[in-house]
Amino acid sequence: MGNIITAGPAQPKPARAVQIDAARGVAVFGILLVNVWSFVWGFGALRYGVMPDPSWADRAAVFLVAFLAEQKFYPIFAFLFGAGFALQTAALRKRLPDWRSVRDSYRGRLTWLLGVGLLHGMLIWAGDILTVYGLTGFLILNMAGARLSRVRFGAWSWLAAWLLLVAVNVMVAWPGADDGALEQDAISYVDDALAAHAVYLSAASDEVIAQRVGDYASITLGSVFLAPHLLALFLLGMLSVRLGWLTRPHRHLDLWRRVRTVGLCIGLPFNLVWAAMALAQAINPVHPQPWNDLVFALLPVGGSVLAAAYLASVMLARGGARRLLFDWLAPVGRMSLTNYLGQSLLGLLLLQGAGLGLGALAERRPALLLALAAAIMVLQVLLSRWWLARHAQGPIEAIYGRRSAVRLDSLRR
């Protein structure tokens, strides 16, 4: 999750922060559309499970999630995490004597985030991103108070490293295996998905725990390859604050218009191709898809480009779209950590065997799974507005804020 630490002692939020909160709210719900499938099918290569005899609504559900959501929202979270780092460290510098104290304070925030991620990943949902953000965040601590030229150099350096990694992945994924090997891989993907499905929906608690911990360890270790992308996005988020792109978007409307145009022109066609391939795989998962791995290797780039267009659209929103974002989605973003963890808890209680086991229905009707995600969104919008009308922060953010205030007092002494 990007910038899910929004806490500190509760203070009035400046008007400019509403757009950042709105973007975070959009990302909270976008990531739910992607994550909800893993509560039913685990974390294997067959992300959308097995669909025997899918209806047109089921096909549309898979197509739309792959087209508009898959790998489009974690880049926004990461970008906003970097922006939050710049904003929070600048605020801390006004209350602490030097940048070393600021880094010590923020190190405590990252440690707390890492601890929450460990508990979340092992006890509730294996796809936790807090652990990865906490660990990667330590790598940008020395950027607190750094010169703008240093931040810019770091951003472009990590971006180049990430693109090089993507190029290597493309070469590895280039079609070359025979149809027999591809078919065996496809059968293995189905077996993995069915095995995870059986464990999460009906197995004994010790088997579920073993599956979850194993999935969590595998995902966390695999995220090493995600680090260059995250670091590039973190630092670009910092630049967006330092240069005013995100904090004063009205002064950079031409920039955001160009980002939106380029993002849509490149991102929509690429992700349309990916969605068609993802749907074909979901409908007939044992049929070899020789180009699937290649397109998937490029998906982080195609997804990030479309994510940039989404973010630009939030910055440029006017009229009814602006009211929707500010009045309804900004409250969700203000308590994004609470909502992120709440989504995981609801997924566990509603879909898996430890709760109501409704994932068994989604086994045959993926459209129902998407409808459940939409219902969770509506619930969180209403609860966020209700809670923030009575409190300055979300409940998890408030717990963190009290802890942060104590640490800040100790650093002042």
Image (cartoon, helix red, strand yellow):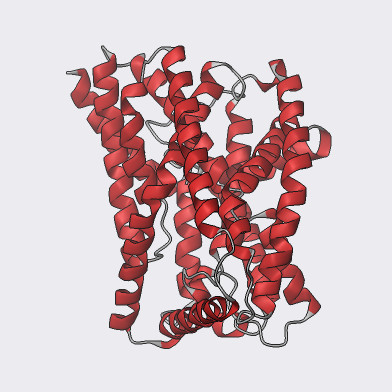
Q: Residue at x 30, y 47 (%)?
A: 114
Which quarter of the rendering shows the C terminus?
top left
Q: Residue at x 59, y 33 (%)?
A: 20
Residue 172 drawn above or below residue 101: below
Do we see residue 389 in this rendering?
no
Residue 133 image point, x, y percent:
39, 44
* Nearer to me, 190 or 121: 190
Residue 379 image point, x, y percent:
61, 60
Residue 62 image point, x, y percent:
69, 68
* Nearer to me, 250 or 57: 57
Residue 323 drawn above or below residue 119: above
The image quadrant that residue 325 belongs to is top right
Residue 292 image point, x, y percent:
62, 64
Do we see residue 306 in this rendering?
yes
Q: Is residue 49 left or right of residue 96?
A: right
Q: Residue at x 42, y 31 (%)?
A: 10
Q: Residue at x 31, y 23 (%)?
A: 142
Residue 274 drawn above or below residue 8: below
